[in-house]
Structures are given as structure tokens and as C-alpha cells.
């Protein structure tokens, strides 16, 4: 394997690892969206 191929392989693997780590971190840190209560939508209905 030539040195340029080895450098390219290392650069690609490192960049993919960094991008994957960034998105994994973003998933763990982002607060969840508040889900609406399904019963609160039925409170104003008459029975």
C-alpha cells in the first residue's frame, strides 16, 4: 500500500468517526420534545 493510500484511509476513518461521534453526542444531549397528552385533547368534549 502506498503512503498516499494509507493517509487517505486514515483521514477517511477519522472523519467518519468524528462525524458519527458528533451526531451520537447530539442525540444524547438534545432534550426530548414534549409530547401532547392524548387525554387533554378530549377534555372539552361533551359526553
Image: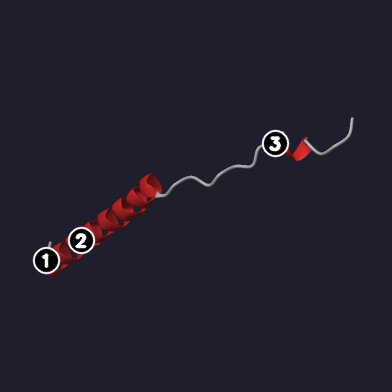
Nearer-the-camera pick, 24 or 43: 43
Which color scheme is applied? secondary structure
Nearer-the-camera pick, 4 or 18: 18
Quadrant of residue 37 in the image? top right
Alpha carbons under labels 1 and 2: distance apart: 11 Å
Query: Percent from the top left, x then y, of residue 12?
Result: 24, 62
Query: Percent from the top left, x then y, of residue 16?
Result: 29, 57
Query: Percent from the top left, x then y, of residue 41?
Result: 75, 40
- What residue is pinned by disc 1? 2
Query: Which mark sits nearer the N-terminus, 3 or 2?
Result: 2
Quadrant of residue 39 in the image? top right
- What residue is pinned by disc 3? 38
Mark 1 secondary-structure assignment: loop
Query: Which mark sits nearer the N-terminus, 1 or 2?
Result: 1
Query: Percent from the top left, x then y, of residue 30?
Result: 41, 49
- What residue is pinned by disc 2? 9
| 7 lies left or right of 24 | left
Nearer-the-camera pick, 40 or 1: 40
Amino acid at each position: 500500500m502506498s503512503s498516499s493510500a494509507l493517509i487517505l484511509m486514515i483521514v477517511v476513518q477519522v472523519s467518519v468517526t468524528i462525524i458519527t461521534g458528533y451526531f451520537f453526542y447530539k442525540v444524547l444531549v438534545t432534550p426530548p420534545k414534549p409530547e401532547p397528552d392524548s387525554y387533554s385533547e378530549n377534555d372539552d368534549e361533551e359526553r
